[in-house]
Amino acid sequence: MAGAQDNTLLRRVGFWVTLAVVFFFFMFPLYWIAVSSIKTRADVISTTPTYIPFLQFEPTLDNYASVLIGGTVESETGVRASADLSVFRDRLVNSVIIAGTSTLLAVGLGTLTAYAVSRFRIPAESDLMFFILSTRMLPPVVVLIPIFLLFSDLKLNNSYLGIILLYTTFNVPFVVWMMKGFFDEIPVEYEEAAMIDGYSRLEAIWKIVIPEAIPAMAATAGFSAIVAWNEFVLANLLNRDYAATVPPWLNSIIGVGAVEWGRLAAASVVFVIPIVVFTFLVRNYLLRGVTFGAVRR
């Protein structure tokens, strides 16, 4: 009996130790960025690293003030460089508009497509689904030149419309695959019973199917928003001026004068907050959505 209890205790201790190590491994980079954002330049570039505010260094909000209110990146000689930090606010607004709109479009279009594939008999359905998924197999850099030429011909460079359509196109295949699997889990008898009661198919979809599909829609919206929010390559080439987003702008700080790591960290923290908040709001749906466990036959 004592041996069994000891083994149980060891397993529990091993589980919590392993969990703590994994948590530290994944969370320490985020903690380091957050801590660096409240350091002075001298503290950031110091050869002796400091980890704990107030104990090892005096925190400051100057980096956040420079990013949110305005400022310039300066070189080591004190010469003013060309990176205007005040444009960060505009870039952040652009990211919210582009990521939010493309996510709504992708989830809407992908959900309707997934429902049609799940509920209706479509010739060569397996081949069609594979073709839809294959559009996500190619990395963006492979299609960069064709997209650049197409955008140049259609005058879609540096526009909200162009980059929103592009991100929507990249996210729709993922939404279709996610939602198709979920719709397969929803018994078709629900809709048939509703239509027998006098509902049209559209009314049955809106009042019966969509409420059941909300967990999957929230999950796909979360993943699609993260993809659009973090995308760098396409935005850096096609969207550098009028409707530029934050990721290319963050890269521009690194290449101007001396690298202001504190301001870069502050901008990164502010950039991460909206997507973290969105993910927190849909957290209750994420697990249910990705496991397709909301409805069982």
Image (cartoon, rainbow, N blue to C red):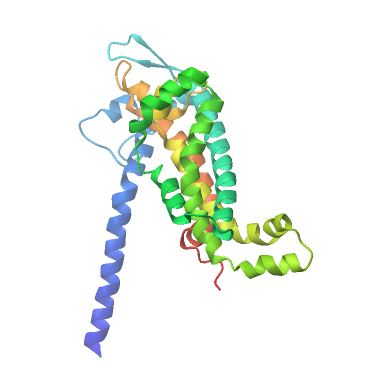
Q: Could you tell me residue 80's position as x and y percent?
A: 37, 10
In the foreground, 219 or 200 = 200
Instruction: Using the rendered image of the protein, determine whether residue 263 is visible from the camera's viewpoint.
Output: no
**Total numbered badges shown on the rendered structure:** 0
Horizontal side, residue 224 vs residue 201: left or right: left
196 relative to 87, above or below: below
Q: Quadrant of residue 100?
A: top right
Q: Could you tell me residue 24's position as x and y percent?
A: 30, 52
Q: Could you tell me residue 90's position as x and y percent?
A: 53, 23
The quarter of the picture where the N terminus appears is bottom left
85 relative to 212, above or below: above
Horizontal side, residue 176 vs residue 236: left or right: right
Instruction: Using the rendered image of the protein, determine whether residue 112 is visible from the camera's viewpoint.
Output: yes
Horizontal side, residue 232 vs residue 91: left or right: left
Looking at this rendering, what residue extends furthest in the top direction? 79
Q: Quadrant of residue 246?
A: top left
The quarter of the picture where the C terminus appears is bottom right
| Residue drawn at 54 percent across, 42 percent down | 106
Looking at this rendering, what residue extends furthest in the front direction? 123
